Amino acid sequence: MYHDKEILHNLFGIEKNLLNKMEEIEKDLDLIFKQVDTSKSFNQYKILSAMQECKLSDQHFNWTTGYGYNDLGRDKLEEVYAKVFKTEDAIVRPTIANGTHALTLCLTGLLQSGDEMVAVTGKPYDTLDKLIGISGDYRGSFKNTNINYKQIDFLENGEVDFASIEKEVTEKTRLVYIQRSTGYGFRKALNIETIEKIIRLVKSKYPHILCMVDNCYGEFLETKEPTEVGADILAGSLIKNPGGGLALSGGYIVGKKALIELISYKLTSPGIGKECGLTFGMSRTMFQGLFLAPHTVSGAIKGAIFCSKLFEEEGYEVQPKHKDQRSDIIQAVKLEDKEKVLAFCRGIQEAAPVDAFVTPVPWDMPGYDHPVIMAAGAFVQGSSIELSADAPIRPPYIVYFQGGLTYEHSKLGVLKALQNIKNLSHAHDSIV
């Protein structure tokens, strides 16, 4: 009978001392992995129950052409999402290009000239810089449309600055923006408890202020979602957690019905809103991906925890640590060296089922101010619920690891990444 160690050594050349370390770590993580499985079970049954309550049928896997009027699958999918996230309404479309697009629809749909947005969890993702006006001067940006932007950074200890929120959020604020995941920061993701605390603080003084959460990478890690603790609007990507690795493209927005209607006018046109828009035959995979998402997410979380523990024991600074509560699937490892970042990403690519023979290199990716390296031999291009890693090429050279449709695949990626880094040291020693 074959064991993991033998297979990983014979098929992928993982060194035996590293495999011995793998065995020790997995024993240490057994209890933590069981806790992950508890959340997985809860979310699996929650989604199953929602699909049953909404009377999902095979007729909802059909689709229309042209304008997309009366697309039963599209309408049912949005009903299911609203039920899962416990909201009044939803937009779930394959034509939402990515998470940034979903967030942009929300912000441009809800904010008008003269409004103020306060980002209370530091600077949002780099890809929103040009919309907000942090960089560039684009037509339609906040700067161009007279929307005021304020930003409250985290405290030095990485915690939310509640005192500054209380001071900077005022009567004239229209929208408070909360980013759940870390982006290219080096902190823990915001858990649901912290998100609830922010929303309660804001709403206790100014009930009219909209609280929006960027939920990318955070779906189904806990037993509640931000919309269950007071968030008015929530957005994310289908090629991350909720697509379960099966959705080919798309994004989702869930929240209050009146807000969804405003956003839908940006999606299509005022007066048309959600009534048009094809699903191009993708309804079935979007339903099935959502159904599988808790299982897929749990494998990715276990892979991230394994990565954290392994690199901690190698002496690297990691965020979050393996024992920390997690609220997104991302594992950050501070490598302090450009060549180590490149080696890590090569290891992830070498572990891929697709394009494993390709060598990832940094490039000037649209939306970013630094070259970025991305490793992702994925079935769906750019899918970060699949095994992937990325890093901006800038000090302190932090690499961001995430995904894996199964824990076994995620684990292999981590092992290949560390082995590549160790090989760098061996090569340096032999030269010296």
Image: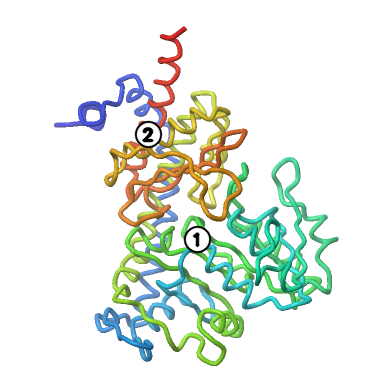
Cα distance between the residues tagged 1 and 2: 33 Å
- The kind of secondary structure element at disc 2 is helix
The residue at 61%/33% (across/down) is 396
- The kind of secondary structure element at disc 1 is loop
Task: Pick the quarter of the image with the N terminus.
Answer: top left
Q: Is residue 361 above or below residue 199?
A: above
The colouring scheme, among rainbow, by chain, secondary structure or one colour, is rainbow
Most foreground residue, 361 or 377? 361
Q: Which mark is residue 91?
A: none
Most foreground residue, 21 or 429? 429
Q: Position of residue 404 (x, y in %)?
A: 36, 47
Identify residue type, mark 2.
Answer: Gly
Q: Residue furthest top?
A: 432
Q: Position of residue 347 (x, y in %)?
A: 37, 34
Q: Circle 1 sits on which residue?
A: 223
Disc 1 packing (10 Å; few <14; some 14–19; many ≥20) = some
Q: Circle 2 sits on which residue?
A: 347
Q: Position of residue 312 (x, y in %)?
A: 52, 29
Disc 2 packing (10 Å; few <14; some 14–19; many ≥20) = many
Q: Is residue 214 above or below residue 368?
A: below
Identify residue type, mark 1.
Answer: Thr
Residue 120 occupies which quadrant of the picture? bottom right
Q: Is residue 334 left or right of residue 276?
A: right
User: Which is more foreground, mark 1 or mark 2?
Assistant: 2
Q: Position of residue 151 (x, y in %)?
A: 75, 57
Q: Residue furthest left?
A: 1
